[in-house]
Structure formats: C-alpha cells, structure tokens
C-alpha cells in the first residue's frame, strides 16, 4: 500500500500547530511559537498534501442557492465587522450545501509565510482556509449521530455541531479562558438537548492535559483530531 505524506497546519495569532500523516500514522506538534517557523525541520520538506487553516472569526456560512459571488463582501459584513482593506474570499462546502464566506485579514502574516514555506510535492502552494472549513470536514468523518467538533485559540471558541446529516450550529464565541469556552459548549448542548455524558467532543486545536481532563469530567470521551 502506498501512503500519501501530508501535513495539516493550524495558524492562530499566537502561534501554530501541525499534524503530519505518513505511513498510516499521525504525529502532532502541539502549539508552537512563530519564531520557530523558519527552523522547523518539518517545514523544510514537501508533502503530497498540504492543508493550512487559519483561526479567523470573520466567517459565515451561506446556503449555496442564496449565494451570489458578487455580494460576498456584503454578506460577510452583515455578520462581522470588516475594515475597508479586508480581503474577502469564499469556498464551497458541498457536505452542508453551503458556501463559506471569510476574510483572512485579522492582523497576522504567519499564515501567508506558512503558505509560502510549506509546499506540495508538485511545487504548488496550499490555499489558506478558515478553521471552520476543517471543522465541518472533520464532522463529516465522525461515525456518531451527534457530532461535536471544537477548537479554541486566541481567546475564542469555535464550535460545530451536527445531528445526523443536519448541521445545527457553526459559530464562534469570545471566551477569554478555557473555562468560559467550556461554558459555551455546555450552553449550546443544553439548547440542542444533547447529553454530554453520552457524547464525545472532538477537539481540533491542541489541548493541554489540564484542559483535556476538565472536559473528561463532563463528556463520555474527548478525542483530539
């Protein structure tokens, strides 16, 4: 069997993390500071697959049949505050029948540097997509009826909840600390009438041991993906 060698990178205002997939195994880095970007040996290689995801709160999901590309900026400006120079992009999310409209203009350059540095085997750069896009893709692969995917970075919780084939929530919440992030998770679960004691929460962002143990007090299981 031939395995594809891939790397998935998460970029936040405070740093980055990565997961490398090779020979059927996955290795995770945990959070790293930006000053290591040019010396990380993992970034000196080329990969069959490169994924780069940015934690941007400037993001919204629109049903495909309502989306007009010429109105992308207007659509996003209705739900988040945009500065005049903010660039607006969009990407199809067929699994939920929607289009994700987003801006990467959040005052960072790290994602662009990563995109220029970590290249695919064919020499092409990977497009930087929002963390929410990766979370929606991850939810599709969860073999449970209730699919709860979360990420936490830069004082903000990102949360996706699906039940069966129905997307119930795709939203972010300002949370100055992880305890506040947990509060929002439980608030959403209560509103959707989901029982944490029989549910698994899947976290894409790296968790430290204390954060993981805190979640284990309430959930049936905690999986880092």
Image: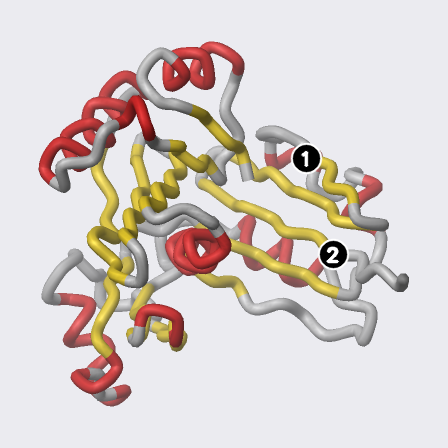
The answer to whether one can see residue 215 in this image is: yes
Percent of width and height locating residue 48: 78, 65
Residue on which disc 2 sits = 6
Density class for disc 2 (Cα within 10 Å; few <14, some 14-19, many ≥20) is: some
Distance in Å between CA atoms under marks 2 and 1: 12 Å
> Which residue is rendered at x = 26% and y = 81% of the image?
64
Residue 22 in the image: above or below residue 62: above
Q: In the picture, residue 40 is in which quadrant?
A: top right
Question: Can see residue 153?
Answer: no
Q: Examine the rendered structure and indicate whether residue 223 appears above or below residue 96.
A: above
Give the residue number, with chain letter if any, for mark 1.
28
Give the residue drawn at x 84%, y 59%.
3
Q: Quarter of the image for the N terminus: give it.
A: bottom right
Location of the C terminus by quadrant is top right
Q: Are marks 2 and 1 in contact (CB under 8 Å)?
A: no
Q: Earlier in the sequence, mark 2 or mark 1?
A: 2
Q: Which residue is at the front of the view, 62 or 23? A: 23
Q: Is residue 24 left or right of residue 8?
A: right
Above or below, comparing residue 160 to residue 101 in the picture: above
* Closer-to-camera residue (193/138): 193
The answer to which image quadrant residue 125 occupies is bottom right
The secondary element bearing badge 2 is classed as strand
Q: Residue at x 58, y 30 (%)?
A: 31
């Amino acid at each position: 069997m031939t395995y594809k060698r891939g790397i998935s990178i998460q970029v936040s205002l405070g740093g980055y993390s990565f997961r490398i997939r090779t020979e059927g195994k996955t290795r995770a880095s945990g959070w790293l500071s930006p000053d290591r970007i040019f010396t990380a040996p993992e970034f000196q290689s080329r990969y069959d697959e490169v994924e780069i995801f940015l934690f941007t709160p400037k993001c919204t999901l629109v049903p495909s049949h309502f989306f007009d590309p010429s109105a992308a900026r207007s659509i996003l400006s209705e739900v988040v505050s945009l500065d005049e120079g903010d660039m607006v992009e969009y990407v199809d999310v067929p699994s939920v029948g929607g289009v994700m409209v987003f801006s990467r203009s959040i005052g960072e350059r790290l994602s662009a540097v990563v995109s220029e540095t970590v290249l695919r085997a064919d020499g092409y750069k990977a497009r930087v997509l929002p963390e929410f896009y990766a979370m929606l893709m991850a939810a599709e692969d969860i073999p449970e009826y209730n699919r709860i995917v979360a990420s936490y970075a830069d004082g903000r919780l990102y949360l996706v909840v699906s039940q069966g084939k129905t997307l119930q929530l795709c939203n972010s919440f300002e949370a100055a600390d992880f305890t506040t992030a947990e509060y929002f998770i439980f608030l959403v679960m209560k509103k959707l009438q989901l029982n944490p004691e029989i549910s698994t929460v899947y976290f894409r962002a790296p968790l430290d041991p204390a954060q993981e143990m805190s979640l284990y007090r309430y959930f049936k299981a905690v999986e880092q993906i």
